[in-house]
């Protein structure tokens, strides 16, 4: 197929000897201007959260969890696999056919260290925040995008909207919320509008003094114009994350500060006079206190320590000479061991389950099990859960690949290879009767 694209709206077909022109839209898409506390009370940029520290607070709370960082890393790793360029075609039955694109320029771009870093860092930002702010670096002659550079999403803030509802700049500072758009440490980068139809020509032909641009990409969530809200954030705002964080604190306090009391021994008041006679009756407060201390020490020698297991403690009681009733004797009560019984274990299990639900991860994949909620940790459970989860990943890959698709348009790859798409291969677990533990399948 020999097709020449003089510009983004015209194509020349040598085989068909035809000129093809693409219709241009008659208007730009609508982008409402938002007026709320986040946009009105800040100068030059849109705050991320009321105090402009929303991502910093999420990271602080998330890192205190033993589950969230590992779970988000696990999700990010699943979309950080090597990217493969394919050409897509379809047979007469509508079945998809993929053919590998062997192009040195594309291959070098996808396999250089800059793109690998972009993959890893953007994947983490997608699952932590659903937002990424990669930088596209132009060649000196502005004909190619040579690199894609990842920016930490928590460092990025979008600029205020212009009259057309577009944020023209992104401000990058590692010190939010203490920075501002005018801080010496703040980096100001022109931002592309993904909704603009002629974005390639706009970037190539306008603002020719700029050689790097931010291409914001995100997974949309309702009611959020500038910064998306991760689906798992409900575990933080609902209070369940606080419950999960308090359980180990309480357990630690029990181990470090609480005396583990096994017995409650009740000694009647009359015992001391009956047992010690004049020594008790004539003794002062100091003498009586010493008698009690010695008795407690004797009890401790008899009851405490593993080496004393099986030792009996004998006490006696008498009968009143007045009414013949039994005089109150000692009572030795055995107390339950709350630590041994798993104090707060049920609270921990319930909060953990809520967290995994919020993260969208089947508990079977993390080996979650509890007496109250049951256990599903067999191989078939894990395999089916993983297959279901993998089937949900493509929209997140699309967020990661959207800047790459724009690069393909800008660099002419999409024109050179009609139907060009970027995909990957994913490992699928198989049953034992197939003779293999896993197989590779293209995901494009």
Image (cartoon, rainbow, N blue to C red):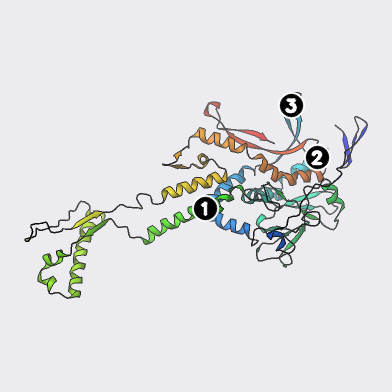
**In this figure, which residue is indicated by the disc labeled 1?**
241
Disc 1 crowd rating (10 Å Cα; few below 14, some 14-19, many 20+) is many
* Residue at (81, 54) in percent of width and height: 164
Q: Counting residues from the N terminus, which is met first, the one under dot 1 or under dot 2?
A: 1
User: Label 1's element?
Assistant: helix
Disc 3 crowd rating (10 Å Cα; few below 14, some 14-19, many 20+) is few
* Residue at (59, 56) in percent of width and height: 59
Given residues 406 and 374, the one toward you in this image is 374
User: Label 2's element?
Assistant: helix
Q: Percent position (x, y) of residue 201?
A: 85, 48
Residue 304 visible to the viewer: no
Q: Counting residues from the N terminus, which is met first, the one under dot 1 or under dot 3?
A: 3
Residue 426 visible to the viewer: yes
Q: Which mark is residue 414?
A: 2
The Cα–Cα distance between marks 1 and 3, rounded to whole angstroms, is 47 Å
Front label number (2 vs 3) = 3
The Cα–Cα distance between marks 1 and 2, rounded to whole angstroms, is 45 Å
* Residue at (67, 55) in percent of width and height: 153
**In this figure, which residue is indicated by the disc labeled 3?**
94
Disc 2 crowd rating (10 Å Cα; few below 14, some 14-19, many 20+) is some
Question: As drawn, is 54 to the left or to the right of 268?
Answer: right
Q: Counting residues from the N terminus, which is met first, the one under dot 2 or under dot 3?
A: 3
């Amino acid at each position: 197929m020999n097709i020449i694209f003089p510009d983004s709206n015209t194509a020349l077909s040598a085989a068909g000897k035809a000129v093809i022109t693409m219709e241009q839209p008659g208007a730009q898409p609508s982008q409402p201007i938002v007026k709320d506390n986040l946009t009105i009370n800040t100068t030059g940029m849109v705050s991320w959260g009321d105090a402009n520290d929303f991502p910093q607070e999420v990271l602080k709370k998330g890192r205190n969890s033993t589950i969230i960082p590992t779970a988000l890393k696990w999700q990010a790793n699943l979309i950080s696999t090597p990217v493969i360029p394919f050409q897509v075609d379809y047979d007469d039955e509508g079945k998809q056919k993929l053919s590998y694109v062997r192009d040195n320029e594309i291959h070098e771009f996808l396999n250089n260290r800059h793109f690998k870093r972009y993959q890893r860092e953007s994947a983490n930002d997608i699952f932590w925040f659903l937002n990424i702010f990669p930088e596209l670096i132009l060649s000196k002659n502005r004909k190619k995008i040579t690199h894609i550079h990842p920016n930490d999403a928590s460092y990025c803030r979008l600029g205020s909207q212009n009259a057309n509802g577009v944020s023209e700049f992104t401000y990058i500072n590692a010190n939010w919320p203490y920075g501002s758009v005018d801080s010496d440490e703040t980096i100001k980068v022109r931002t592309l509008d993904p909704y603009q139809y002629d974005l390639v020509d706009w970037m190539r032909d306008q603002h020719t003094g700029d050689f790097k641009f931010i291409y914001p990409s995100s997974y949309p969530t309702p009611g959020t114009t500038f910064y998306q809200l991760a689906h798992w954030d409900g575990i933080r705002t609902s209070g369940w994350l606080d419950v999960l964080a308090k359980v180990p604190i309480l357990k630690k306090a029990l181990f470090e500060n609480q005396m583990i009391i096994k017995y409650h021994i009740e000694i009647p008041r009359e015992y001391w006079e009956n047992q010690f006679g004049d020594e008790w009756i004539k003794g002062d407060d100091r003498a009586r206190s010493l008698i009690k201390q010695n008795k407690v020490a004797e009890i401790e020698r008899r009851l405490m320590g593993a080496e004393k297991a099986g030792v009996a403690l004998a006490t006696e009681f008498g009968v009143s000479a007045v009414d013949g009733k039994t005089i109150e004797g000692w009572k030795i009560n055995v107390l339950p061991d709350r630590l041994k019984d798993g104090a707060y274990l049920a609270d921990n299990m319930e909060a953990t389950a809520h967290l995994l639900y919020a993260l969208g991860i089947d508990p079977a994949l993390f080996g979650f099990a509890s007496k109250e909620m049951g256990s599903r940790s067999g191989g078939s459970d894990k395999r089916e859960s993983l297959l279901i989860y993998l089937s949900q990943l493509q929209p997140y890959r699309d967020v990661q690949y959207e800047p790459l698709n724009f690069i393909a348009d800008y660099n002419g790859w999409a024109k050179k290879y009609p139907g060009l798409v970027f995909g990957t291969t994913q490992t699928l677990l198989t049953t034992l009767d197939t003779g293999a533990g896993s197989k590779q399948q293209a995901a494009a």
